[in-house]
């Protein structure tokens, strides 16, 4: 390795005319780095939302005696797939990222359905005067149900954005097509 002079800013032994021989990083590698950084932020937010989901799964629903095993199972599967997805993100493993995208999406769908069913969200929304009056009056819904609806919508939107980020990262990680 050549020592660099701090004053001139170029390696010793060159006159600066070697500019045309210097390597440039391909733009898709820069996109992969940005995608990994964006995906790590999505993973952190998803982990926080899964923690909130486990709290919602703990709350008793209409049938207070039965625990919500589907919600607990889907939160557990989501956390495991999140760990696998994070390993795939750090080590640039497309197979692990695909596994994460598919399994966590299914687990999230099961979580949303089980929480909505356990707390009778669909019935509460249909029976409220929210849709009949033409005004947006949410007085018929409890605060818990409003918070749960907002949580489920936020989780769904985040999951769509995360899957989009994973697909974009996988597309940029793939080797370029050879032109013949």
Image (cartoon, rainbow, N blue to C red):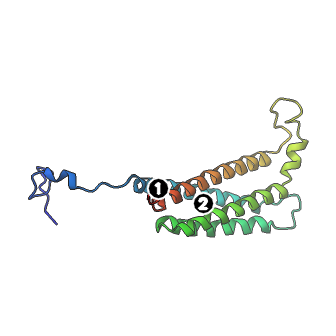
- Determine the image quadrant of residue 180: bottom left
Give me the residue at 84% from left, 58% from top: 118
Choose between 112 and 103: the one closer to the eye: 103
93 up-or-down from 166: above or below:
below
Residue 109 got which mark?
A: none
Choose between 54 and 106: the one closer to the eye: 106
Q: Residues within 10 Å of mark 1 (few under 14, many from 20)?
A: some
- Determine the image quadrant of residue 49: bottom right
Q: In which quarter of the image is the N terminus?
A: bottom left
- Residue 150 falls left or right of residue 93: right
Give me the residue at 80% from left, 65% from top: 68
Give me the residue at 40% from left, 54% from top: 30
Residue 37 got which mark?
A: 1
Mark 1 element type? helix
- Determine the image quadrant of residue 99: bottom right
Q: Where is residue 124 in the image (x, y as percent from the top left)?
A: 87, 46
- Give the mark nearer the N terminus: 1 vs 2: 1
Residue 47 got which mark?
A: 2
Of badges 1 and 2, the one in the foreground is: 1
Give me the residue at 81% from left, 54% from top: 116
Q: Where is residue 56 in the image (x, y as percent from the top left)?
A: 74, 58
Q: Position of residue 13 (x, y in %)?
A: 8, 59
């Amino acid at each position: 390795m050549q020592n660099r002079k701090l004053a001139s800013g170029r390696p010793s032994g060159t006159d600066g005319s070697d500019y045309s021989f210097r390597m440039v990083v391909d733009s898709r590698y820069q996109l992969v780095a940005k995608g990994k950084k964006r995906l790590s932020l999505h993973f952190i937010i998803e982990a926080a939302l899964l923690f909130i989901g486990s709290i919602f799964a703990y709350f008793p629903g209409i049938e207070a005696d039965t625990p919500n095993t589907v919600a607990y199972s889907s939160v557990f599967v989501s956390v495991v797939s999140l760990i696998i997805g994070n390993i795939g993100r750090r080590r640039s493993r497309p197979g692990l990222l695909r596994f994460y995208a598919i399994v966590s999406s299914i687990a999230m769908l099961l979580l949303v359905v089980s929480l909505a069913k356990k707390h009778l969200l669909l019935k509460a929304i249909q029976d409220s005067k929210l849709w009949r009056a033409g005004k947006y009056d949410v007085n018929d819904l409890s605060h818990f149900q409003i918070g749960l609806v907002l949580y489920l919508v936020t989780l769904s939107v985040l999951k769509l954005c995360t899957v989009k980020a994973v697909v974009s990262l996988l597309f940029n990680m793939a080797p370029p097509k050879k032109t013949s």
